[in-house]
């Protein structure tokens, strides 16, 4: 119980702060340390390290200390366990009982972040980028030599960064950000890049000799999973993360209508096939619906990758409020059993807004999170889920690659609408496709950890790369003799 009480969950990862503190104490400059989870200005949790330095150590000033400690931790622990800020204090504050007084820990100041030499941004592009970084990362100032990820950035914030930059007229790919995370270097790439006019399409990789690969958002409209996955992949093609279209509140869309709108963004980038798609969870069903439109237009779909995507067997008739509750519960599957059951019982007689508040009370949603914005997200997700439930997948003359996990099925939706097929490697797609057209590949983890645990994600990325490089269009090209 004590161990569980010390654990924190950040961006889906369960973390032991004591393990991080132990690594910090191994550094010659650190005599004592504690790591805690705090809310940043955007309401997201972040790790903050408080260090008591050894008196005999000759210490650097300002952000150089944070940079050195960050490099030390990064060498021993995965990225999601590296603190965003490192605060130097004279001694750990204690309560009269001798326990850590968390309320007395000071908020991180500007020098607590890993910084390079302090030089202000230059030019309109750098200044605009710096303002966006400061808002997203919750820091007072950003210099032209500062590093996005060393200041606390991660893949979820990368999505927001690219979206805000596009609104400000700055276009760059996610690959640009990962390859040039220093403000000055990223700014130098921006004016050289051409971005699709669809405002929400995110360019993850821009170049390659093969046809593009389009990733479809999940059932919550999230495409942040694409960045860390593609970073581990071996691909020779442009990669894009597709948006959800605008949803009409008064006239709910069918999945076919949603797919038709998304297809417009696809064809703007690639007017003709062969087309290649990948989708995680229920997003894969949207990918299939997009392929349906393209096949009907006599376009070739040469590659489909489904990442643990089950095709529902039974339609369900739920009211919009009921559907929203179901979607929220499914998104809370990371909770321990007791917390999950609390929400299940509470959901029976509550509105979606009340259920969100209850989830916040039990710690499933950060205290500073914008609940109104979250409510809109779940309402849109419920519309999308309703469209999924009404969708009748046709039989298409295509092949799919199903990357499935053997972990337990936690989802109430999967248990109710998929039943025993949830444990089948084919995940119910053999109802609409020939069994031999489904290439099932087992990957480690469960539905969540297959993507957010680095070791599992690396295996998935390797398997996905192999399948992509063996796709029909790639094989045909390899058979063409050189001129």
Image: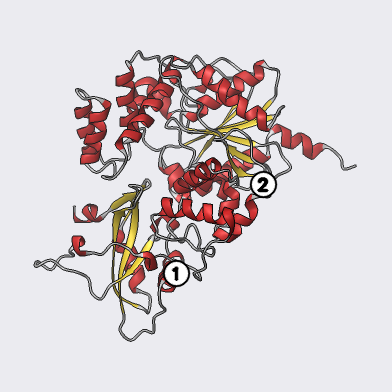
Q: Residue furthest right?
A: 483
* C-beta proximity under 8 Å, tags 2 and 1: no
Q: Residue furthest bottom?
A: 56
Could you say which quadrant of the image residue 24 lies in? bottom left
Q: Indicate the position of residue 247 as horizontal and vertical percent values.
A: 46, 23
Residue at 61 percent of width and 23 percent of height: 291
Of 183 and 181, the residue lying toward us: 183
Q: In this view, does 297 lie above or below 68?
A: above
> Label 2's element?
loop
Q: Is residue 200 above or below residue 417?
A: below
Number of dots carrying numbers: 2
Q: Indicate the position of residue 330 as horizontal and vertical percent values.
A: 34, 31
Looking at the rendered structure, which numbered label has been put on residue 67?
A: 1
> Label 1's element?
helix
Q: Can residue 82 be seen in this view?
A: yes
- CA neighbours of label 2 inside 10 A, class few (<14), some (14 to 19), many (20+): few
Q: Indicate the position of residue 453 as horizontal and vertical percent values.
A: 43, 48
Of 437 and 213, the residue lying toward us: 213
- CA neighbours of label 1 inside 10 A, class few (<14), some (14 to 19), many (20+): many
Residue at 27 percent of width and 41 percent of height: 364
Of 165 and 374, the residue lying toward us: 165
Q: Which residue lies furthest to the left in this view?
A: 96
How far apart are the alpha carbons under marks 2 and 1?
A: 31 Å
**Position of the C terminus by quadrant:** top right
Instruction: Say which residue label 2 marks.
Output: 193
Earlier-in-chain disc, 2 versus 1: 1
Of 397 and 378, the residue lying toward us: 378
């Amino acid at each position: 119980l004590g161990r569980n009480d010390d654990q924190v969950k950040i961006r889906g990862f369960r973390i032991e702060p004591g393990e991080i503190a132990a690594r910090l104490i191994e550094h010659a400059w650190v005599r004592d340390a504690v790591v805690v989870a705090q809310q940043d200005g955007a309401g997201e949790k972040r790790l903050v390290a408080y260090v008591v330095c050894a008196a005999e150590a000759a210490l650097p000033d300002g952000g150089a200390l944070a940079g050195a400690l960050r490099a030390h931790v990064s060498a021993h622990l995965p990225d999601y366990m590296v603190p965003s800020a490192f605060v130097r204090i004279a001694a750990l504050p204690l309560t009269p009982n001798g326990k850590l007084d968390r309320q007395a820990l000071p908020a991180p100041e500007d020098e607590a972040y890993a910084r390079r030499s302090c030089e202000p941004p230059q030019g309109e592009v750098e200044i605009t980028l710096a303002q966006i970084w400061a808002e997203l990362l919750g820091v007072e100032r950003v210099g032209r030599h500062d590093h996005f990820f060393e200041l606390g950035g991660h893949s979820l914030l990368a999505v927001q960064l690219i979206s805000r930059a596009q609104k400000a007229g700055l276009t760059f790919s996610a690959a640009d950000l990962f390859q040039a995370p220093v403000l000055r270097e990223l700014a130098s790439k921006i004016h050289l890049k051409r971005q699709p006019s669809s405002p929400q399409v995110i360019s993850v990789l821009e170049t390659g000799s093969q046809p593009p690969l389009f990733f479809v958002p999940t059932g919550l409209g999230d495409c942040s999973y694409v960045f860390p996955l593609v970073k581990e992949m071996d691909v020779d093609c442009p990669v894009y993360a597709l948006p959800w279209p605008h949803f009409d509140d008064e006239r709910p869309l069918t999945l076919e209508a949603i797919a038709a709108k998304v297809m417009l963004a696809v064809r703007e980038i690639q007017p003709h096939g062969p087309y290649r798609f990948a989708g995680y969870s229920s997003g894969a069903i949207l990918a299939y619906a997009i392929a349906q439109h393209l096949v009907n237009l006599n376009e070739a779909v040469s590659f489909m990758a489904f990442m643990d995507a089950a095709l529902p067997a039974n339609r369900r008739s739920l009211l919009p409020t009921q559907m929203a509750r179901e979607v929220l519960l499914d998104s809370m599957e990371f909770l321990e059993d007791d917390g999950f059951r609390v929400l299940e019982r509470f959901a029976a007689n509550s509105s979606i807004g009340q259920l969100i508040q209850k989830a916040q009370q039990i710690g499933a949603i950060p205290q500073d999170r914008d609940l109104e914005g979250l409510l809109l997200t779940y309402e849109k997700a419920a519309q999308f889920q309703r469209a999924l439930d009404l969708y009748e997948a046709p039989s298409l003359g295509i092949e799919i690659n199903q990357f499935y996990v053997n972990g337990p099925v936690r989802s109430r939706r999967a248990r109710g609408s998929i039943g025993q097929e949830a444990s089948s490697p084919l995940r119910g797609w053999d109802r609409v496709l020939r069994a031999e057209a489904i290439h099932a590949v087992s990957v480690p983890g469960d539905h969540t950890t297959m993507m957010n645990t680095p070791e599992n994600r690396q295996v998935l990325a390797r398997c996905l790369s192999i399948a992509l490089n063996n796709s029909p269009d790639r094989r045909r090209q390899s058979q063409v003799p050189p001129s």
